[in-house]
Amino acid sequence: MLPMSEVLSIKWTPERRSKLREIRGRIPLVDIASRLNEVGVEISRQYLYKIETSDDVKGVSPEIIEGLAIVLGVSVTELLCLDSRLIVLPRVDI
């Protein structure tokens, strides 16, 4: 399995923006940013807003994705709108 630390960016789609808004609900972005900073993910409220609303964001770092999943209490799979039954992890022999 490829460690998340080796992944530069995860494709960010309109579906994922919508899912983030849905999961976040009424929690203010400033609170999410604060919680992310507490778990070691440095991010501003402004960038979270951009991730949630802008078509200009084409990719999001794995650190932000993992942090959001932790802070929002969901799995990375749910946040990324993935069907876990369809995820196949390749085996890499070194």
Image (cartoon, helix red, strand yellow):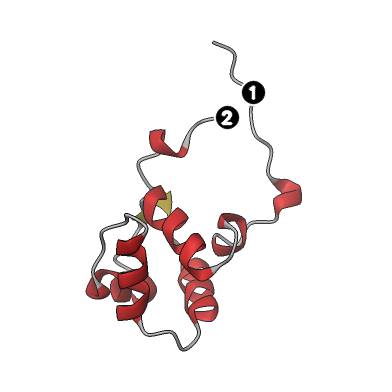
Whether tag 2 and tag 1 are in contact, CB under 8 A, the answer is yes
| Residue occupied by mark 1 | 91
Q: Nearer the viewer, residue 59 or 42?
A: 42
User: Residue 76: x, y in percent?
Assistant: 56, 56
Q: Amino acid at mark 1?
A: Arg
Q: Is residue 41 left or right of residue 78?
A: left
Residue 90 image position (x, y, % from top left): 63, 28
Quarter placement of the C terminus: top right
Residue at point 46%, 54% (across, down): 66
Image x and y of residue 35, in percent: 36, 69
Q: Residue furthest bottom?
A: 26
Q: Which dot marks residue 13?
A: none
Q: How many numbered marks, from 0 up?
A: 2
Which label's residue is closer to the chain start, 2 or 1? 2
The residue furthest top is 94
Note whether 67 is above or below 32 in the view shown: above
- The residue wearing badge 2 is 1
Q: Secondary structure at mark 2?
A: loop
Which residue lies at the image location 30% right of the left edge and 63% below the top edge? 37
Query: Residue 58 in the image: x percent, y percent?
Result: 35, 58
Q: Quadrant of residue 30?
A: bottom left
- In this view, the residue in front, 41 or 22, is 41
Question: Residue 59's image quarter?
Answer: bottom left
2 left or right of 7 in image = right
The quarter of the picture where the N terminus appears is top right
**38 left or right of 77 in image:** left
The structure residue drawn at horizontal position 54% and vertical position 80%, both measured from the top left corner, is 22
Secondary structure found at label 1: loop
72 with respect to 41 (left or right): right
